Image: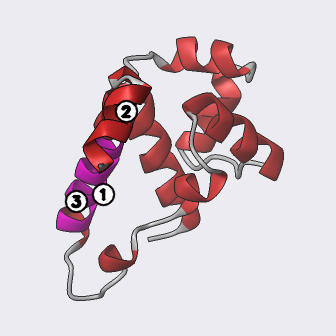
Amino acid sequence: MSLSNNFSNNVSVLREIRKLTLTEFANEIQISRSHLQSVLRYSCNPTLDTVEQVAKGLDVDPLTLLSLPKDMEDASVSPPFAQNLQEMKLHLRAVLHILEEMLPEDSASEEKE
């Protein structure tokens, strides 16, 4: 899978998790909707600044948007299965992030003891 595919898939999944339309997300990160749509449809390549701006808007590391987890790079994994696996992992990461935000600081330190 190409970096463009990874970027488009990761942005789409993370944006949907946040329940934002393309227009809402584009406005939030101050990129025109048409430019963002062009990038996500592979009509043009994003600049590094755009990747960084999108990552900041999604609260993820820019490399996350370009990456395909190592276990999905294995040629023995079929592309449809790899795509589903990638989407599930992104959903789980988002859920974990939300749960960590909801958990009070004191509870987290008590569990470690």
Q: Are marks 1 and 3 in contact (CB under 8 Å)?
A: yes
1 relative to 107 in the view: left or right: right
Chief SS of the magenta region: helix
Q: If you read the primary sequence from the N terminus, does the residue marked by circle 2 or circle 3 appear first?
A: 3
Distance, label 2 to label 3, CA atoms, is: 22 Å
Count of marks, rendered view: 3
Above or below — where is 6 with respect to 97?
below
Residue of label 2:
100
The mark lying in front, picked from 1 and 2, is: 2
Query: What's the residue at 75%, 19% (across, down)?
Result: 30
Query: What's the residue at 39%, 27% (across, down)?
Result: 106
Query: What's the residue at 37%, 80% (across, down)?
Result: 73
The three-letter amino acid code for the residue at tag 1 is Gln
**Residue 85 badge:** 3
The three-letter amino acid code for the residue at tag 3 is Leu
Q: Are marks 2 and 3 in contact (CB under 8 Å)?
A: no
**Residue 42 badge:** none
75 relative to 6 in the view: left or right: left
Label 2 CA crowd tier, 10 Å (few <14, some 14–19, many 20+): few
| Secondary structure found at label 1 | helix
| Secondary structure found at label 3 | helix
Stretch in magenta: 81-94
Extreme residue toward the bottom, this view:
75
The mark lying in front, picked from 2 and 3, is: 2
15 relative to 61 in the view: left or right: left
For residue 25, say whether it is visible.
yes
| Secondary structure found at label 2 | helix
Residue of label 1:
86
Above or below — where is 14 with respect to 72?
above
| Residue 17 rendering spot, x and y as whole percentages | 34, 28
Q: Quadrant of residue 37?
A: top right
